[in-house]
Image (cartoon, rainbow, N blue to C red):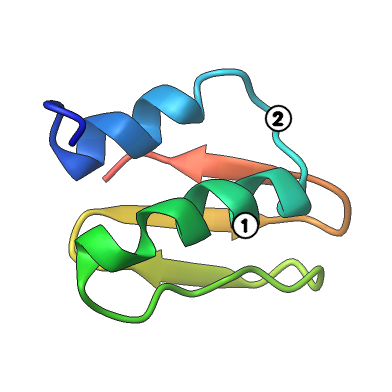
Amino acid sequence: MNPLPLRERITGALRLEPMTISELARVLCACRRDVGEELVIMRARGDVHELPNWAGWVNTPRRVLRVAA
C-alpha cells in the first residue's frame, strides 16, 4: 500500500498540468477504492465539480485544471 495519504497521492499525480480528461479519469479510478465513495468523472462541458471533501476541479472542453481546496 502506498504510504502517502490519498490527497497527496492524487495531487502529486496531477502536478504536470494541464492534464487531459482521460488522464485525470485514470488517476481518479485508480484511487476510487481508497476514497470509499463515488468520484465524479469530468464531462467535457466546462462544468465545475467537487471531489470528496477536499478538492475542486474545473474542466474545460479539452483540458482539466486543478483548483486548490
Q: Earlier in the sequence, mark 2 or mark 1?
A: 2
Which three-letter amino acid code belongs to the residue tagged 2? Pro
Q: Position of residue 28 (x, y in %)?
A: 48, 55
Q: Residue furthest bottom?
A: 38
Residue placed under numbered mark 2 in the picture: 18
Above/below status of 30 relative to 48: above
Q: Residue furthest right?
A: 62
Above/below status of 8 relative to 7: above
Q: Position of residue 62 (x, y in %)?
A: 88, 50
Q: Residue at x 70, y 35 (%)?
A: 19
Neighbour class for label 1 at 10 Å: few (<14), some, many (≥20)? some
Q: Secondary structure at mark 2?
A: loop
Residue placed under numbered mark 1 in the picture: 25
Neighbour class for label 2 at 10 Å: few (<14), some, many (≥20)? some
Q: Position of residue 46 (x, y in %)?
A: 74, 66
Q: Residue furthest top?
A: 16
